[in-house]
Image (spheres, grey):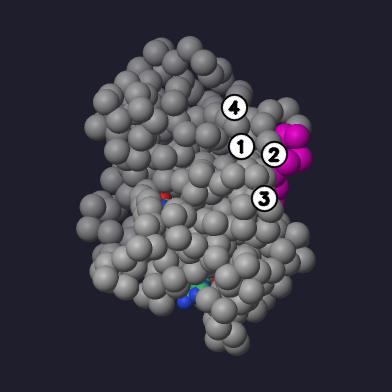
Amino acid sequence: MKALIYQNNSIKFREKENPKIQSSRDAIVKVKLSSICTSDLHIIRGAVPQAKEGIVLGHEFVGEIVELGDGIKNLKIGDRVSSNCETFCGECYFCKRGFINNCEHGGWMLGCKIDGCQAEYIRVPFADTGLTKLPENVTYEKALFVGDILSSGYFGAELCEIKENDTIAVIGAGPVGLCAMASAKTFLAGKIIAIDIDSYRLETAKKLNLADYIFNPTECNIETEIKKLTSNRGADGVIECAGSNSSFEMSWKIARPNSIVAVVAMYEENQILPLPQMYGKNLIFKTGGVDAVHCKTLLDMISKGILNTDFLISKTFKLDEIEQAYKYFENKTDNCLKVAIEY
Ligand SMILES: NC(=O)c1ccc[n+]([C@@H]2O[C@H](COP(=O)([O-])OP(=O)(O)OC[C@H]3O[C@@H](n4cnc5c(N)ncnc54)[C@H](O)[C@@H]3O)[C@@H](O)[C@H]2O)c1
Ligand SMILES: [Zn+2]
Ligand SMILES: [Zn+2]
């Protein structure tokens, strides 16, 4: 089969042997649509030490089951499925509590420690927990982001413990931030404020009705603007999806006292928690890699038209063009949000 291989801080599109079932809970999936994630770029840049040389990259995909291990009872050959970006056993201490990101037998494996999805076929371990069957009316395009960025945005909204009519600020209107805004609406947030330095992304949030207000920190004082909208209190919850030094500082500055700051972003540098300055604000910080445990719920909401992420696909490439797709995504050509790779 054809596959995109990571080697020596670069990528190569070449032939590779098809994957085989190795354990009773494995499935082989024929990939129908996949995407490229910022994390794939982190691997290529050498910023993910656990990434293995020679693996197939990619962990965001949907496809059709073509082979199943004999331990899998909840799926069948021919099922159209979306895959979780995390591999998890469902049985260990952490999995039982829903903290699948810390599964004792899994974690971020696909496209990092074992072969991923940017190939014609992929072996998915613990397929009974990691694959979710698509509702009949949900296309591959509509389901593509369920297992990774939509789950991450939803995770941020969930961490915020949003109450009805809350004003929620989302820093970063990239793919994850836009998914966090859409998710915050499902938790009945009243006002959603999108903050980004990229005006195209802000306009997208406004145009798609994902945000009620948009602010660019290079054009205004964000703290002042948010205070104006919240009777001088600050946001009832903040979801930080940008990942820069100034965005972390902004996240706690714009939060009202006694609120939750949910940090979904991944930083490349340490951040400072200036406790003396924050004293008396009584904030709760929650951080983490996504516990993507709501794939079925998210697919049901997509099926009912409550959530929609297909607008994120800025351009679709053929598998043969995947190296080109990486450049397009990395350079944000034509304001690209995400790319889809079709097979
Ligand atoms: N926790 C998880 O499990 C998880 C999962 C997926 C992604 N992530 C992380 O979430 C973050 C967002 O992912 P993405 O794919 O949307 O990335 P992205 O880079 O496309 O989006 C980040 C956005 O933040 C904006 N931004 C940068 N500096 C800013 C600033 N100072 N103020 C306001 N906005 C600013 C950028 O313009 C961009 O639009 C990344 O850090 C990514 O690594 C975390
Ligand atoms: Zn990812
Ligand atoms: Zn586990």
Please give left or right for residue 204 compared with residue 266 in the image: right
Q: How far apart are marks 1 and 4 (CA)?
A: 12 Å
Report how far apart the C-alphas of labels 2 and 4 lie in the structure.
13 Å
From this view, report whether residue 324 is shown above or below residue 67: below
Find the distance from the CA under tag 4 to the CA under tag 3. Answer: 33 Å
Specify the segment rendered in magenta: 303-310
| Residue under the image location 55 percent in, 65 percent down | 233
Question: Which structural element holds mark 1?
Answer: helix
**Cβ atoms under marks 2 and 4 closer than 8 Å:** no
Which residue in the structure is indicated by mark 4? Answer: 133
* Cα gap from disc 1 to disc 2, whole angstroms: 6 Å
- The location of residue 122, given as percent across then percent down, is 44, 38
Numbered tag placed on residue 298 in the rendering: 1
Q: Main secondary structure of the magenta part?
A: loop
Comparing labels 2 and 4, the label whose residue is closer to the camera: 2
Q: Name the residue under label 2.
A: 302
**How much space separates mark 3 and mark 1, taking CA atoms?**
21 Å
Q: What type is the residue that disc 2 sits on? A: Ile
In the image, which disc is placed on residue 165? 3
Q: Marks 1 and 4: CB-CB under 8 Å?
A: no
Quadrant position of residue 107: top left
Disc 1 marks a residue whose amino acid type is Leu
Q: Which residue is drawn at 34% across and 44% down?
A: 108
Judged from this view, the residue extending furthest toward the bottom is 219
Q: Which of marks 3 and 1 is nearer the N terminus?
A: 3
Mark 3 lies within 8 Å of ligand 1 (Cβ measured): no
Q: In this view, does 23 lie to the left or right of 231?
A: left
